[in-house]
Image (cartoon, rainbow, N blue to C red):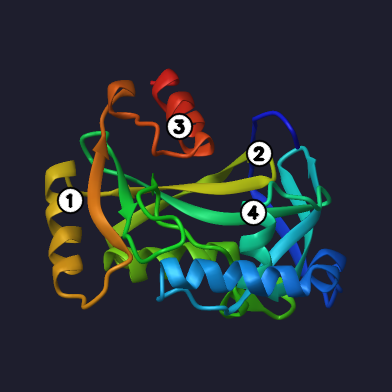
Amino acid sequence: MTSLTIHRVTTLDLAVRPLVWPFAEERRADIAVHFAEKQRERPKLWNGRVLLGRDAVFTDDHLAATYFETDFASFLAWRDWGFPDAAVFNGFGMGALRTSDGAFVMGEMAQHTSNAGRIYFPSGTPDLNDVKGGVLDIPGSVVRELAEETGLTAADYTVEVDWHCVVSGRAIAMIKVLNLDMPGDQARARIEANLAREDEPELSAIHLVRGMSDLTPTMPRFVTAFIEQQFASR
């Protein structure tokens, strides 16, 4: 998982197991100091429970991996320190909203979040709410995160069959294309109206990507690679 690769799959097999993460145990004191520093910068950060993956295997149209529970502080330190445990990856779902006129809809993360200023599709690091019967429910995570960040529900879009799994460094973005039956400007206005009703929205702005010229350095590479592939196939 060192170079960027995009796997197109139809099924996900993501078992959740009770594993001990040596990195989190051995660096506990350093992690606590690091998180305290981050909280001083962004007081809204919360040290909740999240899920990280390991042992990812792609076979034909299938992705299998094992997930384990850890705290957000350990995840943040692992990410900020350059991913010192190379056996672990951050695997998450993303809902790629595509409007009826072909634009992709992305959100800019608000300043109080850990990814402030970054622009990408609605998503989030999986947590315990996404576990169903010992399995990580990425489709459910996508629906939940989309509703929380944009106000859109499953009634607002149709879901394509395949997952576009973008492997970039220690991240696997499992992207599902969601087709909205409305043009880009209407979709943006609707989401912005929803954000205006919230006291502290996760997103600070909505961006429409209609072509390669709309890509920016604030978009993660796994997002721009997916967009490039989508536009190339048109």
Q: From the viewer's side, name the closer residue of 153 and 193.
A: 193
Between discs 4 and 3, the one toward the N terminus: 4
Tell me, yes or no, if residue 45 can be seen here.
Answer: yes
Q: Residues within 10 Å of mark 3 (few under 14, many from 20)?
A: some
Pointers 4 and 1 in contact (CB under 8 A)? no
- How far separated are the C-alphas under marks 4 and 3? 20 Å
Look at the picture and state if 213 lies above or below 116: above
Mark 4 or 3: in front is: 4
Amino acid type assigned to the residue bearing label 2 in the image: Val
Answer with the quarter of the image where residue 105 lies: top left
Vertical side of 53 occupied by 212: above or below? above
Disc 1 vs disc 2: Cβ atoms closer than 8 Å? no
Q: Amino acid at mark 3?
A: Thr
- Taking the spot 64% from the left edge, 54% from the top edge, the residue there is 79
Mark 4 / mark 1, whichever is N-terminal:
4
Residue contact between numbered discs 4 and 3, judged by CB atoms under 8 Å: no
**Residue 188: which disc?**
1
Q: Which of 212/9 is in front? A: 212
The quadrant in which the C terminus is found is top left
Measured Cα–Cα span from mark 3 to mark 1: 20 Å
Q: Residue 233 sits in which quadrant?
A: top left
Q: What number is the disc on residue 224?
A: 3
Q: In this orientation, which residue lies closer to the viewer: 112 or 206?
A: 112
Which circle's residue, 2 or 3, is located before the other in the chain?
A: 2
Label 1 vs label 2: CA separation?
A: 28 Å
* Residue, disc 4: 79
Amino acid residing under circle 1: Arg
Q: Label 4 to label 2, Cα distance in Å? A: 16 Å
- Mark 3 or mark 1: which is in front? 3
Within 10 Å of disc 1 (Cα), the crowding (few <14, some 14-19, many 20+) is many
Q: Is residue 50 above or below residue 209?
A: below
Q: Give the number of the disc on residue 167.
A: 2
